[in-house]
Image (cartoon, rainbow, N blue to C red):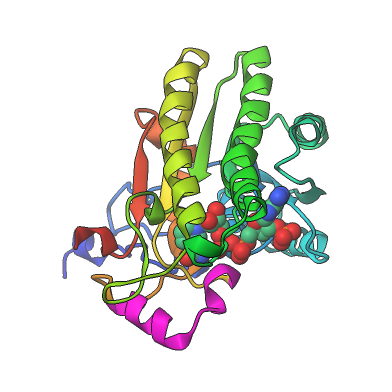
Amino acid sequence: MTSSTSAKVTVPGLLKDEPVAEGKGSKAKGFVFDFTDKCVVVTGGNRGIGYEFSRAAAKAGARVAIIYRSSKDAHEKAENISKEFGVKVKAYQCDVSDSEKVNSTMEFIDEDIGPITGLIANAGVAVVKPALELTAEDFHKQFNVNVLGVFNSARAAANLWIDTKQGGSIVITSSMSSRIYNQAGPGKPLTQVFYNSSKGAVSNLVKGLAAEWAQYKIRVNALSPGYVNTDQTRHMEPEIREWQAQSTILGRFAEPEEMTGQAVLLLSDYGSYMTGGEYFVDGGKLAW
Ligand SMILES: NC(=O)c1ccc[n+]([C@@H]2O[C@H](COP(=O)([O-])OP(=O)(O)OC[C@H]3O[C@@H](n4cnc5c(N)ncnc54)[C@H](OP(=O)(O)O)[C@@H]3O)[C@@H](O)[C@H]2O)c1
């Protein structure tokens, strides 16, 4: 084996791997994301996909602010990540649908552990119910978090960056549901029209925000997961989960940490030419 082929390669599960080793005689040190001068806010960063986003940003060296709604263990989760990677990680309670509270929380974070350089607007909720039974309350529950909450978070960050002329990167967790109508089985709808339409809305929001804020050096992109093992999907019937898993090219659900590579790339300077885009991390589901 030559020295160039013996270099280790990072693979999914990357958060648990050792850094890439230097090849013999090579100056390569692997592909490094250095966030040591960054501060990243992750809404819904205390569990599920968001928790792994928080870990990934911390692993890259960033200070991390986790925004949560009501989970009792958010501060403990932040502390755990802080200990794991030796960086400042703190949790801040804030309902993202409350625009005033989001503005004040973002300003507080900026002073507390900032300056904020990146945002992952990830908090989201899903209601699975047949369309004929949906209520206005169900609509507001979904859209107030998945669309208005994302907008509130993005605008609060943008306002900080416009003031300081620093710019920044915003990653919005949308979903492959922005493009498709999910199925519970062959020809069987999953019944979540408000969830899917909220994700369609937020994927389009990304384009407008990217277009309006490029002048302030702000990039805005969507990361759209496929099926991921989290609290949002765990409660579903095993037959539905099995069918959904088999409907992807990879034949399985993702683990939350498999979403992190794309998010870190979009937050980093390596993503400097990426804005207004939607990036699907879906195990090939949308290919079929
Ligand atoms: N799981 C999937 O298969 C999948 C697929 C595609 C897209 N997504 C999207 O990925 C994102 C994360 O999903 P997940 O499965 O990781 O979700 P999850 O495990 O259900 O966690 C949801 C997170 O959002 C927070 N949150 C909810 N409402 C909030 C509010 N009003 N204000 C502040 N925080 C709020 C929760 O905080 P508390 O813990 O305090 O309640 C929690 O941290 C969502 O946008 C979801 O739609 C998920």
Residue 36 in view of the camera: no
Q: Which residues are magenta?
A: 231-246
Residue 253 in view of the camera: yes
Where does residue 53 sit, x and y in percent of width and height? Answer: 56, 54
Where 66 sits versus 100, above or below?
A: below
Q: At 79% across and 30% down in the image, what residue appears?
A: 100
Q: Is residue 179 left or right of residue 120?
A: left
User: Residue 83 occupies which quadrant of the picture?
Assistant: bottom right
Where does residue 181 sit, x and y in percent of width and height? Answer: 35, 59
Where 161 sits versus 99, above or below?
A: above
Q: At 61% across and 13% down in the image, what residue appears?
A: 165
Quarter containing ligand 1? bottom right
198 or 82: nearer the viewer: 198
207 or 170: nearer the viewer: 207
Where does residue 284 sit, x and y in percent of width and height? Answer: 26, 63
42 or 137: nearer the viewer: 137
Q: Quadrant of the C terminus?
A: bottom left
Q: Is residue 126 left or right of residue 176?
A: right
- Magenta span includes 237: yes
Count of numbered marks: 0
Q: Residue furthest bottom?
A: 239
Q: Quadrant of the N terminus?
A: bottom left
